[in-house]
Image (cartoon, coloured by chain):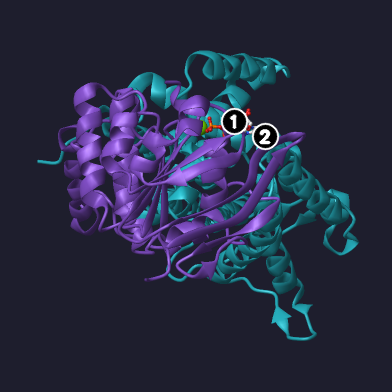
Amino acid sequence: MTEPLLVLDGLQKSFGALRATDDVSLSVDAGSIHALIGPNGAGKSTLIGQIAGALRPDAGKIAFMARDVTGLSVPQRAQLGLGRTFQVSSLAMEFSALRNVMLAVQARKRSTFRFWRPVRGDRDLTDPAMLQLERVGLAERAQLPVTALSHGERRQLELAVALALEPKVLLLDEPMAGLGGEDSQRMTEVLGNLRQEAAMLLVEHDMDAVFTLADEISVLVYGRIIASGSVADIRASQEVRDAYLGE
Amino acid sequence: MVEMSRENLFNAAIAGLLLALPLGAWALGESYYISVASRVAILALAGVGLNLALGFGGMVSFGHAAFFGLGGYAAGVLSHHAFEGSAFLNWPLTIDGSDSTLTLWFAALLVSGLVAAVIGAISLRTSGVYFIMITLAFAQMIFYLAVSLPTYGGEDGLPLYLRSSLPGLDLSDDLTFFFVCYGLLLLAIFLSLRLVGSRFGAALQCARQNETRLSAIGIAPYPVKLTAFVFSAMITGLAGALFVELNGFVSPSILSWHLSGEIMIFVILGGVGRFYGPIVGAALFIVLETVIGGYTERWQLFLGVILLGVVLFARGGVIGLLAGKARHD
Ligand SMILES: Nc1ncnc2c1ncn2[C@@H]1O[C@H](COP(=O)(O)OP(=O)(O)O)[C@@H](O)[C@H]1O
Ligand SMILES: [Mg+2]
């Protein structure tokens, strides 16, 4: 067995008296999708934030590719290959969709400190960027500013931007939220095909998508992981049904 | 065919007008208006510098007079020593005064750039109102430092008797001096255009729009903003050196917070993040000052009303009003 790509060990995070992350340990293996489900307010986004580096855990450790990254900043982690999407789209709103992805391409190439050559029409940036936009089904909308994109399209763009970083692990915070039936199917397909390229920690409420995609599922309730296992295990678990699936 | 957008046409008109004014004045023998045009070009240059930080990087610096003034003092002090035949510094290394224009410009760029690196490194740890206040505070510190330096005239400032010399050009000729200022202004705009359009510029603009996004793709906003802040200060510092040359005088007034505010007004009036905006802003400012200022001392009241109008109704400034919204791709 190879070591998991991402390992969380005893993470704790409180907001005042609220324990948003309560002794969370989990791991994401190479080539696999680990889904994280749980009711609203369970602490899923808070957990993603700690892994990405935007939030400091109060205790615990985060190892990425066998390296302790707990003390690293967001950009440092991203450069190591830890990509993320946001639950609420966070993009450069005045830029076109293409420009948003181009910026990620230039970030991956570590070429930000170049002051002279215009990015406009720079094939080294536009070609890889268009590739990612095609992949998520946004190629025809490439030239539009983000403000002109629909909610669903912004979700797709978030993914294209994250993919342009060629991450080893993707942290996806509700990528299907607000997508229509067709779009969420497409998103499910895209993510399924990505598995070998990037392992994923997938936060998602769409249970069809979760059951289709996940290799492993963890259930988070009140900051705690109450169950963890294969799709079949979780489906069968009475505790999970009571706490979350509401069946 | 080169595609000319409305903004490009408008920009060409602005640049053309600024060139036509002193030429007309020269033809009519009205040399006073040549120096007015030089003043506009120099103040616009200071605005082009600030625009880089404020317009493209979203860094609302209320301390750019510090860089304008430091550029001015760097040039003025060296020129003063050249006139006196004394050295600016004897230890640990000897720095003589200089009457070479290029040396003075270099000194202005160096000093404003270095100080901006220090001020920026500290100020950029804050944001929003705190950033505005801390840049103002630094500028005020430098202002009081200049006031308390008797060697260079303290509060009263220092007259400069020497015109600096640029190989092949006679800067004491008003029209020649204008051309030099105008050339530097267009050069600075051109460099800004290249910078903003480059990979660095893309990151800088993203830092303005959404720092979280920039971090998430692995680009740390801080060094990007700091670098832009230093470039911005250097352009404004060069404007300060030209200003001192134009006036033949250097005094703490070029370090005062009023001037910081005025440079900001040039940018806002013309249009934040519009490359030629500072020319419009500076020109409008000077026109108000000379025309309305000729009738009443309260010309700044009119300025205030116009500024209010721009902020409330024309967020893109005059250029935004006449040429439409800025275009991104
Ligand atoms: N920055 C914060 N400050 C205080 N409380 C927060 C903060 N972020 C999240 N919370 C709280 O932590 C809990 C978990 O939130 P979140 O991680 O967003 O849940 P989820 O993503 O699972 O819906 C919620 O009760 C939320 O109100
Ligand atoms: Mg959430």
In the image, B279 versus A20, the foreground residue is A20
Where's ligand 1: which quadrant?
Answer: top right
Callouts 1 and 2 in the same chain: yes
In the image, A209 versus B316, the foreground residue is A209
Look at the picture and state if B183 lies above or below A113: above
In the image, B7 versus A123, the foreground residue is A123
Look at the picture and state if B34 lies above or below B199: above
Q: CA distance from mark 1 to mark 2?
A: 6 Å
Residue A54: mark: none
Image position, residue A96 (x, y; %): 29, 36
- Whether label 1 touches label 2, CB < 8 Å: yes
| Residue at x-position 55% and y-position 19% | B311
Question: As drawn, is A18 to the left or to the right of A81?
Answer: right
Q: Which residue is mark 1?
A: B265
Element on which disc 1 rests: helix
For badge 1, the amino acid type reads Ile
Q: How many marks?
A: 2
Image position, residue A150 (x, y; %): 30, 23
For badge 2, the amino acid type reads Gly
Q: Chain of mark 1?
A: B
- Letter of the chain shown purple in the rendering: A
Element on which disc 2 rests: helix
**In this rendering, does residue A122 appear at all?**
yes
Q: Which residue is mark 2?
A: B261
What shade does chain B have?
cyan
